[in-house]
Image: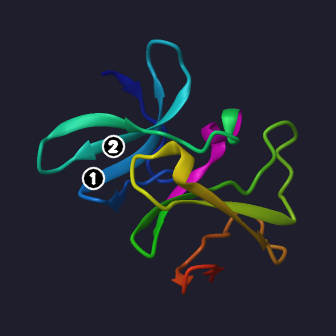
Amino acid sequence: PFYWHPDTSTSPGVFVDGSIHWIACNASDCKPTIVAFDLAKETFCEAPPPSLVGDMLVCSHLVALGGYLCMYNIQEIDDWAVKEEIDIWVMKEYGIRESWIRFTVSSLGALFDFRPLCMVGQDQVV
C-alpha cells in the first residue's frame, strides 16, 4: 500500500505489539489512517481507529501508554482552537476497533505541548 506521510516530527512512530504505528493518508483516497509496520513480518497494515474519531484522525497524535496504542487530539478541526478537555483513546485489544475506550482529561491550559506520559492503573492518565 502507498501512503502520504506527515512530518514525522509531529507524528513520530509509536511501538506497540511488535509494530511501529503512525498516522498517514492513504494515497488512493487521501483519507487518514493508522499505518502499522510489523517488524517481525516486515509487512504494512492498517490499525483500525476509534469509530467516533472520523476526520479528527488527521490532526491526532499517537502514543504508547501502559503497552496500549493510544491516540489524542489537542485541537478542534474546524477552528484549530485548543481544547479545554482532551479525549485520550486507548485500544484495549490490539487490532479490534470496538476495543477503543475513551478517557477525558483536562488540558490544564496546555497549548501545543500537551502529551500524556503514562497510565496509572487501568483508568488514570498522567
Question: Seen from this angle, which residue lies furthest bottom?
Answer: 120
Asked if residue 32 lies left or right of residue 40, the reply is right
Image coordinates of residue 85 in percent, x first then y, are 83, 65
Let me know if residue 61 is in the magenta part: yes
Q: Quadrant of residue 104?
A: bottom right
**Dot 1 alpha-carbon crowd within 10 angstroms: few under 14, some 14 to 19, many 20 or more:** many
Q: Nearer the viewer, residue 21 or 96?
A: 96
Q: Which residues are magenta?
A: 55-62
Q: Looking at the picture, does residue 54 appear above or below residue 37?
A: above
Q: Confirm or deny contact between disc 1 and disc 2 (CB under 8 A).
A: yes
Q: How is the image coloured?
A: rainbow
Asked if residue 59 lies left or right of residue 11, the reply is right
Image coordinates of residue 81 in percent, x first then y, are 86, 51
Residue appearing at x 69%, y 33% in the figure: 55
Let me know if residue 90 is in the magenta part: no
Indicate the secondary structure of the residue bearing disc 2: strand
Q: Say the numbered circle drawn on residue 36.
A: 2
* Residue identifier under label 1: 19
Q: How far apart in space, not on screen, are marks 1 and 2 (Cα)?
A: 6 Å
Image coordinates of residue 99 in percent, x first then y, are 53, 53
Q: Nearer the viewer, residue 24 or 47?
A: 47
Q: Earlier in the sequence, mark 1 or mark 2?
A: 1
Q: Say the numbered circle drawn on residue 50.
A: none
Mark 1: which amino acid? Ser
Quadrant of the drawing holding the N terminus: top left
Q: Looking at the picture, does residue 83 appear above or below residue 55?
A: below
The number of callouts visible is: 2
Q: Quadrant of residue 74?
A: bottom right
Image coordinates of residue 91 in percent, x first then y, are 50, 57
Quadrant of the drawing holding the C terminus: bottom right
